[in-house]
Image (cartoon, rainbow, N blue to C red):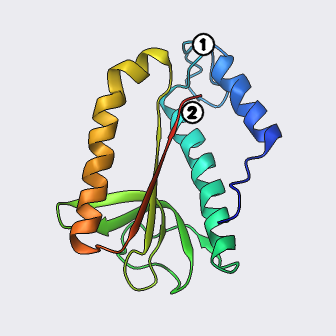
Amino acid sequence: MPAINISEEELKRWGKLWLSDENPENEKKKDKAPFSFDRQQSVRFASFIDLAVGQALATALGGIPVVKPNSKSLLPEKIDCIEVGAVRVIGGVRPQNYDVAYRPDGPRIVFDSKTLNEEKSVGKNWQNMINDLATEATTIHTRFPYAIVAFIVVVP
């Protein structure tokens, strides 16, 4: 698989937002703790990482298109594409949303990113996050034993 390319300039922009005590994109203009993302920023930062992973995967699979999934559909928009966004898969344990998927005839590759926002979040949420990831892997492999399940944990 090719390298996951993350723009240095874009990463610097995210770093400045993480260091700041405000979110300039928040309509309510509420302050936030410095050295962390607020919820909105955390979701957008994870999406930024997901897109980079999706683009690298699309390149590895021969330059197939990257599309946004339809949240109301269990099938991709195109037969041969990478979906980046909330991709719903009905697994053996429960339905599960993944952040990136390749599923031309069922899930072959699924990917999920998790962000731990600040130092205290790592200690507080690490074990819960690991349990979530284990459940995600179990639910997909129960129905699709040959699927590749990948995860990334991002700590700014």
Q: Nearer the viewer, residue 16 or 30?
A: 16
- Pointer 1 with pointer 2, Cβ within 8 A: no
Where's residue 65, x and y in %? 65, 76
Where's residue 109, x and y in %? 45, 69
Q: Residues within 10 Å of mark 1 (few under 14, many from 20)?
A: some
Specify the quadrant that holds the N terminus.
bottom right
**Amino acid type of the residue tagged 2 in the rendering:** Gln
C-alpha distance separating marks 1 and 2 = 12 Å
Q: Name the residue under label 2.
A: 41
Secondary structure under badge 1?
Answer: loop
Secondary structure under badge 2?
Answer: helix
**18 sits left or right of 118 in the view:** right
Give the residue at x 41% y 21%: 121
**89 sits left or right of 99 in the view:** left
Q: In this view, does 39 lie above or below 142?
A: above
**Amino acid type of the residue tagged 1 in the rendering:** Pro
Give the residue at x 29% y 65%: 140
Give the residue at x 77% y 40%: 10
Q: Name the residue under label 1.
A: 34
Q: In the figure, residue 97 lies in which quadrant? A: bottom left
